[in-house]
Amino acid sequence: MKFEEAYRWLLDYSKTTALYESVMGLLHWDLRTCLPPRGHAHRSEQIAEMTALVYRRATDPRLGEMLAEAQAAKNRFSDFSDEAVNLREWRRNFDRAVRIPQKLAVELAKAASEGQFAWQEARRENNWESFRPYLERILALKRQEGEALSTGGKEVYDALIDDFEQGETAAGIESLFTELEAATFKLLEKIEAAPRKPDPGVLRGDCPALAQQTFIREVIGALGYDFDAGRLDLSAHPFTSGIGPGDVRITTRLDPDSFVMGLFSSIHETGHALYEHGLPPEHRGTPCGSPVSMAIHESQSRIWENMVGKSPGFWNHFYPTACSHFPWLNKTGRDEFLFAVNEVRRSPIRTEADEVTYNLHIIMRFKLERMLIGGELQAADLPQAWNSFMDRYFHIQPQSFSEGVLQDIHWSSGAFGYFPSYALGNMYAARFYAKAQEELGNLEQMFSAGEFSPLLDWLRKNVHSRGSRLLARDLVKAACGEELNADSLVSYLEAKYEAAYGLR
C-alpha cells in the first residue's frame, strides 16, 4: 500500500474517532450541568457503551497495520511536519490503548460516572463514608491502569501523569515542586509579617445572580470569548468542555454575597476556552489540532484569571462597569478593591486560594495521590492525611469533609495525575506572560484601554496554533527560549506581592 493511501485512511479514522469522543464530551457536559438525578444510571450505561466503542477503535488491529504502513515511509517527511506529528501521537495513543483491556477501560468509565454523582451527593451532605467505597473502586481500577501502562520498571504513578503531561515523571515534578514550595513559604512568611493588610469585606455585598451573569458575560466577551461558539452555565465545579469546533462550553459557580468567585472562575474557564478556540481548525480531529497537555491548557486559564484579571490595568477598565452592576462598590475605591482581590491568606479551599498559596494546595494533592496510587496511603485514611497536610501547609483544620477531602471533583472522576498540571501550568503561564510583555510592550496600559487582543493574538501565534506539534517543555522553549523552571513564577509572585504589600 502506498504511504498516501495509509495516511489518508489514518486521517479519516482519527477524525471519525474524534466525533465519537465529542459525543462523549457532550454526555459528560450534560452529566455535570443539568442531568436529572434519576437519569444517572442510564447515563452511566451510555458512557460505558460509548467508551467501549471508542476503545475498540483505539485498539483496532487495522489501525496498527495502517500505522506500520505509514511509518515505514517516515524518511519522506521532517520531524515536525504534519505527518510526523500525527503519526507520532497516533502511535503513542495506540501503544497505550492496546495495553489496557477493554473490560478495564469500560469499568473505569462507569466507575468515574458513578463516582462523580456520588461525590456531588457526598459533598452536599458532608458524608465522606458514602463516597469512600466509590473512591476505593476507582483507586483499584486506576492502579490496574497504571500497572498496565507502566514500562521499564517506572513508578506506576508516572503512567497516570503521562495521560496529562507526556514525558513528565513524578520525580521530575517533585524536583520542580520542591523549589517552588521553599520559595512560596519564604514569600508567604514575608507577606504575613507585613503591617499592611487588605480588607476582604470590601468584596462582599448584594450580588443578584442575573447581575453577576450579565457582568461576567461582558467581561469574558471583551477578553475574546465567542458566545456564538459556546455557552455559559452553572455547575457544582466550574469546567470547560470542548465539544468540537464552534462549541466550547464553560460553567461557573456563583456566590450571592460576592461576585468575585463567579467572575474569576469564569475568566479562568474562558482561558481554557480561548485555547480550544485557537487550535488550528484545519487540523481538528488530529493531534496537530489538539491541545498538547493539561499544563499548557492550565497556563492559558491562569494567565487570564490572574495575570490579566487581577491586574491594575484590568480593573482600571472594568471597575466602573462593576460599580454599575453592583452599586455598593461605589463606596470602595478601586485600589482598595484591587488589594482585597489580591489578598494572600492561607485558606482551606483550593479554588478560592490566592496565587501565592494556590501552588501549596497542588503540591499537597500531588503528594497525597502519589501515595494513594503507590499504596502507601489507603482511601480510608485519606481524611486524616488530608487534615495533616492542611495543618502543616496552612495551619488550618477543615471544618467539614466538604471543606476538606471532598472539595475537589478530580479523584471522583478518576483523574489521578491531573493535579500536578495546575502548578506546572502556573510555571508555564509566568514564562509565557513575561515573554509576551517583552515582545508587546506594556500590557497593563493595553488592559487599561480595554485592549486584550494583542495578548490573545500573541498566545494564538505562539501557543494555540501549534497544537501538539511540540511537547509542552519543547513548546515553552520554542516560544520563550528557556527551559521550564520555577524561576519565572517565583519572580512574578515576588514582584507582584512585595509591591502590593509594601515590602519594598
Image (cartoon, rainbow, N blue to C red):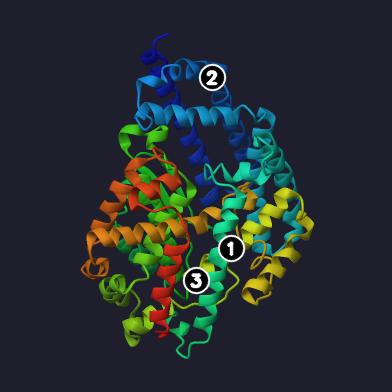
* 218 w.r.t. 15: above or below: below
Would residue 314 be found to the left or right of residue 131 on screen?
left
- What residue do we see at 24% from left, 58% from top? 439
Give the CA separation, mark 3 to mark 1.
15 Å
Q: Nearer the viewer, residue 399 or 44?
A: 399
Under mark 3, the amino acid is Val
Mark 2–mark 3 distance (CA, rounded to whole Å): 47 Å
The mark closer to the camera, 3 or 1, is: 1
Q: Tell me the quadrant of the picture where the C terminus can be found.
A: bottom left
Quadrant location of the N terminus in the rendered image: top left
Q: Nearer the viewer, residue 36 or 404?
A: 404
To which residue does mark 2 refer? 64
Determine which of the numbered discs, if any, sits on residue 178 in the image: 1
Q: Which residue is mark 3?
A: 356
**Is 62 positioned to the left or the right of 365 in the image?**
left
Residue type indicated by callout 1: Thr
Q: Earlier in the sequence, mark 3 or mark 1?
A: 1
Q: CA distance from mark 2 to mark 1?
A: 41 Å
